[in-house]
Image (tube, rainbow, N blue to C red):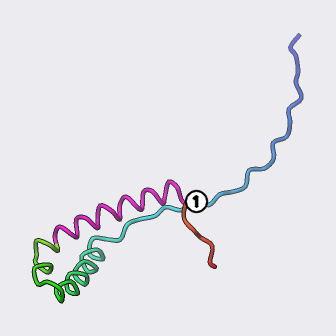
Amino acid sequence: MAKRRAVKAESPVPQVKTVEYFPPSAPEIERYVGEVCTRLADIDVELNTPEVRHELTNFVRVIAGLCAKIYTRHGKLLDTNPE
């Protein structure tokens, strides 16, 4: 004869809202980098060349993508307290 065990009722698991983060779009990053380079040109004109804009855009794109992945996977790390 099969043995029977009492099954404990599991407590309900609270619903956790999953949030997916996305990096800014390429045009948004390019606009931002353009503004940054324009301001940096006040310090040094060489910081507002097409090459600098291109390289900085690539850098920001990579960092924004990584941050979006990290925030999506580990959203609890973000401080969501409004205070």
Classify 13 as above or below 27.
Answer: above
- At x 89%, y 10%, the residue is 1
Residue 71 falls left or right of residue 40 = right
Q: Which residues are magenta?
A: 54-76
Residue 44: which quarter of the image? bottom left
Near-viewer residue (8 or 45):
45
Residue 33 falls left or right of residue 10 = left
- At x 41%, y 61%, the residue is 67
Residue 14, given in percent of the width and then of the height, sits at 73, 55
- At x 35%, y 71%, the residue is 24
Classify 80 as above or below 19.
Answer: below
Q: Amino acid at mark 1?
A: Lys
Count of picture labels: 1
Residue 22: which quarter of the image? bottom left
Residue 70 falls left or right of residue 33 = right
Residue 50, given in percent of the width and then of the height, sits at 10, 75
Residue at the far bottom in the pictured view: 42
The verdict on residue 34 being magenta is: no
Task: Give the secondary structure at mark 1.
Answer: helix
Q: Which residue in the structure is indicated by mark 1?
A: 76
Residue 10, given in percent of the width and then of the height, sits at 81, 42
Label 1 crowd bin: few (<14), some (14–19), many (20+), radius 10 Å? few
- What secondary structure is the magenta-colored segment mainly? helix
Residue 83 falls left or right of residue 47 = right
Residue at the far top in the pictured view: 1
Looking at the figure, which quarter contains the C terminus?
bottom right
The verdict on residue 57 being magenta is: yes
- At x 81%, y 47%, the residue is 11
Classify 4 as above or below 53.
Answer: above
Near-viewer residue (32 or 5):
32
